[in-house]
């Protein structure tokens, strides 16, 4: 399984960049992972082999499965998110792209092109902070799947 964590816009805060690198390193112990800074939504849908606004969301064959982070998406507990990732890993050969939008979130067209929309909680988070929360939850999910004690002390 390959996971791509994508975010729109450059990182402004050194602390966010440091945490991003730390969690990408931790996740890489469990799965192939890549962090991607994208300039805009068009780059995201192009990378995923999708066409925003089309009825099928596809442009030829999909290159990956697109999951958007949005406060109006489906909420998971950490255990449920781990199950989601584990089930995906067992059943789908395509890379999984977990995407955090820019300061204004995602357009309706990009939401229509995604296969899943997940919420990190009902509160609105700054997009750079949402990225760190997502990375930590991906790491936590893999520690849950592997029985590592990281999660057990919550």
Image (cartoon, rainbow, N blue to C red):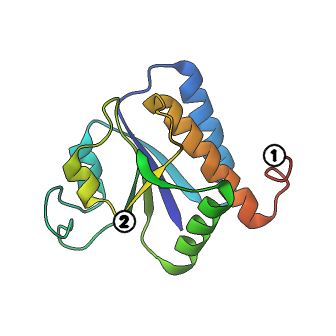
Residue at image position (51%, 35%) is 123
Q: Position of residue 81 (x, y in %)?
A: 60, 60
Sequence-first disc among 2 and 1: 2
From the viewer's perspective, is residue 124 above or below residue 44? above
Badge 1 element: loop
Q: Label 1, on which residue?
A: 154
Q: Position of residue 2 (x, y in %)?
A: 51, 63
From the viewer's perspective, is residue 21 above or below residue 29? above
Q: Left or right: 2 with respect to 59? A: right
The one nearer the camera, 9 or 80, is 80
Q: Which mark is residue 64?
A: 2
Label 2 to label 1, Cα distance in Å? 32 Å
From the viewer's perspective, is residue 130 above or below residue 140? above
Looking at the rendered image, the disc whose residue lies closer to the viewer, 2 or 1, is: 1
Residue at image position (81%, 46%) is 154
Q: Position of residue 98 (x, y in %)?
A: 45, 53
The 10 Å Cα crowd at callout 1, few under 14, some 14 to 19, many 20 or more, is few
Can the viewer see residue 152?
A: yes
Residue at image position (38%, 28%) is 10
The number of callouts visible is 2
Q: Left or right: 119 with respect to 147? A: left
Q: Quadrant of the N terminus?
A: bottom right
Q: Left or right: 78 with respect to 52? A: right
Q: Position of residue 144 (x, y in %)?
A: 74, 60
Badge 2 element: loop
The 10 Å Cα crowd at callout 2, few under 14, some 14 to 19, many 20 or more, is many
């Amino acid at each position: 399984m390959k996971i791509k964590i994508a975010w729109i816009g450059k990182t402004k805060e050194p602390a966010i960049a440091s945490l991003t690198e730390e969690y990408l390193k931790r996740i890489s112990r469990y799965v192939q992972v890549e962090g991607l800074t994208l300039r805009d939504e068009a780059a995201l849908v192009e990378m995923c082999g999708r066409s925003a606004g089309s009825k099928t969301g596809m442009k030829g064959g999909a290159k990956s499965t697109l999951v958007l982070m949005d406060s109006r998406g489906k909420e998971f507990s950490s255990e449920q998110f781990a199950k989601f990732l584990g089930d995906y890993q067992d059943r789908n050969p395509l890379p999984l792209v977990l995407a955090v939008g820019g300061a204004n979130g995602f357009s309706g067209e990009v939401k229509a092109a995604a296969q899943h929309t997940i919420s990190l909680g009902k509160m609105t988070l700054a997009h750079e902070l949402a990225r760190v929360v997502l990375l930590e939850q991906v790491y936590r999910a893999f520690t849950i799947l592997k029985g590592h004690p990281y999660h057990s002390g919550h």
